[in-house]
Amino acid sequence: MDPRRRERTGHFTRREFLRSAAVAAGGTVAAATGAARGARRGAGPVAGGPASAAASATAPAATKTQATGPHVAVIGAGAFGGWTALMLRRRGARVTLVDAWGAGNPRASSGGETRVIRSIYGKDEAMTRMAARALALWRENERRFGVTLFHPTGVLWMTGEDDRYVRDALPNVRAAGLTVDEITLADAAARWPQIRFDGVRRVLLEKDAGYLLARDACDAVQRAFVAAGGDYLQAEARPFAALSDASRIGPMALGDGTILAADVYVFACGPWLGTLFGNVIGDLVRPTRQELFVFGPPAGDVRYTDARLPVWIDLGERLLYGIPASGIRGFKFGDDTRGALFDPTTGDRTPSAEGARAARLALGRRFPALKDAPIVEASVCQYENTPDGRFIIDRHPRAANVFFAGGGSGHGFKHGPAIGELVASMALGETPPDPAFGLARFAT
Ligand SMILES: Cc1cc2nc3c(=O)[nH]c(=O)nc-3n(C[C@H](O)[C@H](O)[C@H](O)COP(=O)(O)OP(=O)(O)OC[C@H]3O[C@@H](n4cnc5c(N)ncnc54)[C@H](O)[C@@H]3O)c2cc1C
C-alpha cells in the first residue's frame, strides 16, 4: 500500500499496523499483536491499549500531509453516510468513507431511481424543519455538483375523512417558509383529469416539494467527497463486537483482513445497523420488505409525466404514493405499508405476483386509465424501521468516539444533507446529540 495513502486513510495491512502500533507505543511488535488480533476478531481494543496508540500514531503524519481536523471513518455511503462524509470533509476533517458494495448499491435503502421529498410531517415540527433545511441544501448542492437531482414537481396530498396529518402540519410548513395551496375538489378534478378523486376529502399541493434522483444523488455526493479530498474504500467493516466499558474504541477490522484506524467512527449502515450492533441497537432498527412497481403509460401519452402531474400521496386507509413518469422513467407506484422482516444481504428481491396485483388494483382506482398498463420495472427494497419512525442519530452509549446515523424508517432519504450536517457537527464535538434522535428514548 502507498505509505502516504496509508497514513492519510488509516488503512493498514496487518503487518503495517503492527509496526505502526509498536512504534507509537514505544514497544515491540509482539506487544501490538494482541490489539491487531482483537481488531481481526471484530472486538475493538479499549483506549490506552496498543491499538489506540496505533490509531493516534497515524494522526501526526496525517496532520503533516493535509488534515486540520480528526480522522473520521464513516461506514456506509448511502444517504446518511455519504452526506455525513461530505460535510465532515468540507469542515476540514480527514475522512475515510467505507462501503461494502458502493454508494446507492441495489441492496442499500438508498438504491433505486427516485425518492419523494416533502415537508408535511403531521405535528412533528422538528421533522418539518429538518426537511426544509434539507431542501435548501439539496438546491445548493446540486448547483455545486452541476447536476439536477431535485425535480420540483410539488406533492399533491389527497386525504380521506381523517385529514389530521396534513392539517396539523400546515402551521409548521408555513413557518418554515414553504408554500402549501389548498385546492377545492372541483378545481383539482379540472386540473388533473387523469386522477379520480373518489373518497378524497381534502386536496393540498405542497409546492416546495417533488422528487429526488436517489442512486444518482449517492453517486454525486461520493464524487464530490472524493473531489474535496476524501478517501473512499470499498470494504466490509467488521465493527467492534465485544464492547465492555471502553470510553474510546478502535481500530476496526475490515473483511479482507486489513485494518482501519481512525479517531472517530460513524456507522451509517442503514438496515444493517441492528445486526452490526446487536447489543446496542438490535431490534430498534427492523428492516421490512417493500415492493415497488413502475407502470408504463400509453405510447406518446404525456398526461402521466412530471410535465403534467406532481408527485402524489394518497392518505386513505393506508398511505399510497407515486412519482410521475419522466424522460425514460415510467410511473412509479408505492405502498407505504410495512412488509415482512427482511435480510438486506441475502433476502430474495423477486417481486411477488400478489404485490403486483394489489399495486395494479390500487393504482387503477386513482388513475383509471393506467389499470391495464404494463409493469415495466419492479423491485424489492427495505425500510429500516425504528419503533417510533424517527431516526437514530446518537453517540454509542459506551464509546465516546463512535456515532450512529440510521433508522430512516421509509422517509430518510430526503433528509440526507441535513442529517450529514448534524452528524458532522456531533462527530467533531461541536454539538451534543439531540435527545429527539437519541437511543435513550427507547429505554423504558
Ligand atoms: C422502497 C423505498 C421507498 C422509499 N421512499 C422514500 C421517499 O420517497 N422519500 C424518502 O425521503 N425516503 C424514502 N425511503 C427511505 C430512504 O430511502 C432511506 O431511509 C435512506 O435511503 C436510508 O439511507 P441510509 O444511508 O441510512 O442506508 P443505506 O442507503 O442502506 O446505506 C447504508 C450503506 O451501508 C453499507 N454497509 C452496511 N453494512 C456495512 C458494513 N459492514 N461495511 C461496509 N458498508 C456497509 C451498505 O452497503 C449501504 O450502502 C424509501 C426507502 C425504500 C426502501
Image (spheres, rainbow, N blue to C red):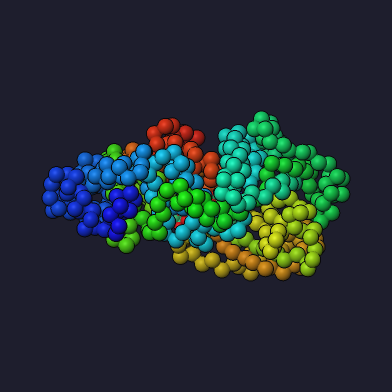
Residue 32 position in % (x across, y down): 17, 51
Q: Where in the figure is residue 35, as x and y percent of width and height? A: 21, 51
Q: Residue at x 83, y 41 (%)?
A: 184
Within the image, what quadrant is residue 25 found in? top left
User: Which residue is nearer to you in this view: 40 or 140?
Assistant: 140
Up/down of 159 relative to 104, above or below = above
167 vs 443, nearest the viewer: 167
- Tell which residue pokes out farthest to the front in this image: 65
Residue 17 position, x and y percent, is 23, 53
Taking the spot 57% from the left edge, 62% from the top edge, the residue there is 380
Report the label total: 0
Residue 290: tell me if it is visible.
no
Q: Quadrant of residue 249?
A: top left
| Closer to the camera in the image, 288 or 444 | 288
| Quarter of the picture holding the C terminus | top left
Relative horizontal placement of residue 195, taking residue 108 as reference (left or right): right
Tell me residue 426's x, y (percent): 42, 36
Quadrant where the image shows the N terminus: bottom left
Is residue 16 in view? yes
Q: Is residue 408 left or right of residue 61?
A: right
Tell me the residue at 72%/69% (across/down). Answer: 374
Residue drawn at point x = 30 percent, y = 52 percent: 4
